Image: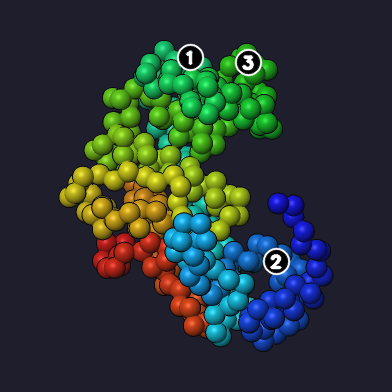
Amino acid sequence: MAYNRPWKSFADQLELLKSRGMSVTDEAAALSYLERIGYYRLSAYWYPFRVFKVAQDPATRALSTVRTDRFEADTQFVGAVELYLFDKKLRLQVMDALERIEIALRVDIAYLLGAHDTFAYLTANSLHPSFANKIGKRTKKSAFDTWQEKYSSLLARSKEDFVKHYRANHGPDLPIWVAVEVWDFGAVSQLLAMMKVADQQRIAAKYGVSDWKVFQSWVRSLSYLRNLAAHHSRLWNRNVTDQPSLPRQGEIAWCDDFIGKADLIAKPFLLLAIARHLVKVVCPHSEWHVRLKKHLEAFPQQHSRRKLSIADMGVPAGWESWWI
């Protein structure tokens, strides 16, 4: 179906929202937000306040719940803006934690692989053959070849002086402890997943995780989280598509709140809890988790009849008891 909605001025956009039942207490401020942030981006934050209705498929007669264009009673424009600002600050705090984790993992990987070979990342010899040679369903290439392409792209884009220095003085290939400085979180995650089991186990154990497969999934999911945060995507109530695995019951106490609860595993709070767990290892004296807790507890008050809360992020009851 061809797209046929016409262009609308900022004033027309605001009038459309008002016609659908949204209350606008300060029109000048609302227009300013539409001009600076955009209707489409903000629409993700007023979406939860739209009215539900039950619809029936005429062919199958199956019932489903759909959202209408109307807003719940007492929905205010400022409520969507406050939710947007909450999410913006959440992403910034997430990036702070993920930077620490990414840098620490770079060192972990370089230290172990470098002991095997200074240039271990350039061949599959120091990696697990089954993992490195696994063919991707989408790429039709081996995991190692896919990683090599990613690394080559990151290296080509790098403007760092140390890259020019090493290549000018020592040849085109960087020792692994230098090469890690051009990796992104995705490259870290992909290379970790190809390492030998013993090496993955050593890294996982450093972070208090006994199952290397669980730890590998944590790093992969945090790479997904990093992409969301870095690209300014809505985070607070997102349905997580790259979900992490969990250890067995009783292995890591806080994880027990999520085991067997698909609704919580599918939301971003579990990823925040994983970040908290790893930051506590990387930076034992960090107050990051304290700052994040304060931010979550400052979740904006809702004016609308539809009440949102951090429970929509997948926060389990009693989380405060183990978070600090």
Q: Residue at x 27, y 41 (%)?
A: 209
Q: Which residue is mark 2?
A: 39
Residue 120, percent across and down?
A: 45, 17
Can residue 3 be seen by looking at this rendering? Answer: yes
Which residue in the rendered view is the most extreme toward the left?
250
Q: Is residue 19 left or right of residue 258?
A: right
Q: Residue at x 61, y 50 (%)?
A: 231
- In front: 168, or 157? 157
Look at label 3 and name its amino acid: Pro
Image quadrant in which you'd find residue 297: bottom left
| Front of the two marks 2 and 1 | 2
Q: Is residue 150 left or right of residue 134?
A: right
| Front of the two marks 3 and 2 | 2
Can residue 93 be seen by looking at this rendering? Answer: no
Residue 38, percent across and down?
A: 71, 64
Label 2 neighbourhood size at 10 Å, few (<14), some (14-19), many (20+)? Answer: some
